[in-house]
């Protein structure tokens, strides 16, 4: 099997200046994700799970260690030392990230958001339009909402848009940070169906899930975190 992502000895701490305190979020993390796998990260709140995903996505700059990603565009690249330009390219074309929080542009409709995401793959507008309607229907987002702004949506609706947007990109690597945390059972099921579809199309996933049962049916392997280190 080919490694898509290999993390070695990753450490990240936060300096809280006003408290004159240094918080170790994670330390000495080794983690491997092979192409085509679905790898899970479990562990209590505060154990460092999100820090790992944010370090991969470049939201956090790490103190030490390496995050080797096998990029289609750049070949082997250490995400810990990638340039901002490279990181932006990868976020646009190769690495997706979904959390339970929606961060969208203001005054952009749902339809525009999803369409934009699809267009970034380099497809034609007609195809993007078609795909947009398909995924919005899949998530059973009320048709009346398609042309309105998600800022006014309920939490569950926002989340569905968020997930739809990440999934239409068909990223090579999809990072999931408890994306289903506030979804009802039915919506979770819809997410699951799409995740299985994406995997069948070749997306590799690294995900944190609140709902362990949900994850168990999908995961190939899991890393269990405790106080910033991997237990198993
Ligand atoms: N931006 C930040 N600033 C300060 N401390 C942080 C920050 N992000 C995470 N931490 C701390 O790092 C530790 C791990 O957090 P996190 O990775 O979010 O855990 P988890 O996702 O497992 O709940 C926690 O003690 C948390 O308070
Ligand atoms: Mg977290």
Image: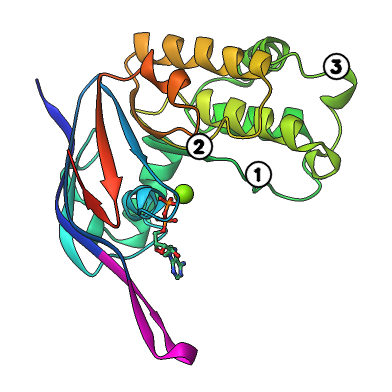
Up-down relation of residue 82 to residue 1 (above or below): below
Q: Residue furthest left?
A: 1
The reply to whether dot 2 and dot 3 touch (C-beta < 8 Å) is no
Q: Is mark 2 within 8 Å of ligand 2?
A: yes
Q: Secondary structure at mark 3?
A: helix
Mark positioned earlier in the residue sequence (2 or 3): 3
Q: Which residue is mark 3?
A: 143
Q: Main secondary structure of the magenta part?
A: strand
Q: Which tag is nearer the camera, tag 1 or tag 2?
A: 2
Q: Nearer the viewer, mark 1 or mark 3?
A: 1
Residue 73 is situated, as x and y percent measured from the top left of the image, at 25, 37
146, above or below 73, in the image: above
Q: What secondary structure is marked by label 1?
A: loop
Q: Which residue is mark 1?
A: 102
Which residues are drawn in magenta? 12-23
Does the rendering let one see residue 81? no
Please state, as top left, top right, bottom left or bottom right, where the C terminus lies in the image. top left
Q: Position of residue 48 (x, y in %)?
A: 35, 54
Q: Which residue is mark 2?
A: 178
Residue depicted at x 50% and y 27%: 211
CA–CA distance in space, label 1 to label 2: 12 Å
Q: What x and y, as percent, mark residue 101? A: 62, 45
Image spot of residue 218 (x, y percent)? 37, 15
- Based on the picture, tell me whether residue 17 belongs to the magenta stretch: yes
């Amino acid at each position: 099997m080919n490694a898509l992502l290999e993390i070695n000895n990753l450490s990240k701490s936060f300096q809280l200046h006003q408290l004159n305190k240094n918080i170790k979020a994670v330390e000495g993390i080794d983690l491997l994700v092979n192409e085509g796998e679905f790898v899970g990260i479990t562990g209590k709140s505060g154990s460092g799970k999100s820090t790992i995903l944010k370090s991969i996505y470049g939201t956090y700059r790490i103190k030490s260690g390496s995050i080797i990603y096998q990029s289609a565009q750049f070949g082997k690249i250490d995400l810990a030392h990638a340039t901002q330009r490279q990181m932006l390219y990868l976020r646009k074309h190769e690495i997706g990230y979904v959390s339970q929080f929606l961060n969208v542009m203001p005054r952009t409709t749902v339809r525009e958001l999803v369409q934009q995401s699809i267009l970034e793959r380099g497809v034609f507008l007609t195809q993007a339009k078609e795909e947009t309607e398909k995924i919005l229907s899949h998530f059973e987002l009320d048709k009346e909402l398609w042309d309105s702004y998600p800022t006014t949506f309920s939490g569950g609706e926002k989340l569905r848009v968020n997930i739809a947007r990440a999934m239409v990109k068909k990223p090579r690597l999809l990072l999931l940070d408890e994306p289903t945390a506030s979804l009802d059972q039915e919506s979770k099921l819809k997410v699951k169906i799409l995740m299985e579809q994406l995997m069948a199309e070749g997306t590799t996933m690294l995900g944190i899930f609140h709902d362990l049962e949900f994850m168990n049916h999908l995961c190939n392997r899991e890393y269990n975190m405790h106080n910033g280190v991997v237990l198993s």
